[in-house]
Image (cartoon, grey):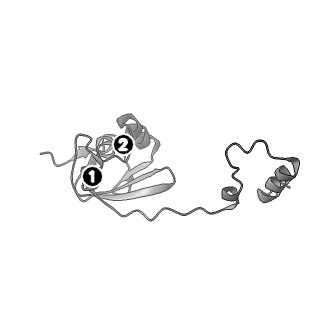
Amino acid sequence: MTDSVRADVWVWAVRLAKTRTQATDACKAGHIRVRGERAKPSTPVRVGDQVVVKGGDRDRIVVVTRLLLKRVGAEPAREAYEDHSPPPVRREHAAAFAVRDRGAGKPTKRERRQLDRLRGRA
């Protein structure tokens, strides 16, 4: 067994990125940090390292507990790290109330004005 794995391979193997190419691109763009520093795709990841993956609606902060070279199922992938990410932010704002029922047709002029006021475009 090796004592380190490439950052892009590990992020892909534990399902923090959908594809290996996306994991590599995220490293190149600076969205992945290992031990607090920006990671290149070839940066070695070792057991005990903190990996931060930025993307989507929140940052994922994980500590490596096991090294993986191949992509595994969701359950074994979760066992390969400890998740220290903050809980996702619940977004309740005006746009959630401006959803029309499917099949309701175009909004009337009055409804359109109400939507504009709600969204702050009045």
Q: Along the polypeptide, which appears first: circle 2 or circle 1?
A: 2
- State the residue in front, 122 or 115: 115
Q: Which residue is drawn at 86% across and 55% down?
A: 122
Instruction: Point out residue 61 in the picture as x, y percentages from the top left corner.
Output: 38, 59
Q: Which residue lies furthest to the top in this view?
A: 21
When the figure is inspected, residue 85 is found, relative to residue 6, above or below; the finding is below
Q: What x and y, as percent, mark residue 60?
A: 41, 56
Mark 2: amino acid: Lys
Q: Residue furthest front?
A: 103
Label 2, residues with CA under 10 Å away: few <14, some 14-19, many ≥20: many
Q: Where is residue 10 in the image (x, y as percent from the top left)?
A: 29, 45
Dot 1: within a 10 Å radius of its alpha carbon, few (fewer than 14), some, or many (20 or more) residues? few
Check if mark 2's residue and mark 1's residue have beta carbons within 8 Å.
Answer: no
**Residue at (25, 43) in percent of width and height:** 72
Mark 2, residue position: 40
Disc 2 secondary structure class: loop
- Rendered view: 25 above or below 109: above
Q: Which mark is residue 103?
A: none
The x, y position of residue 109, in whole percent, is 87, 48
The residue beneath circle 1 is 75
Residue type, mark 1 in image: Glu
Q: How far apart are marks 2 and 1 (CA)?
A: 27 Å
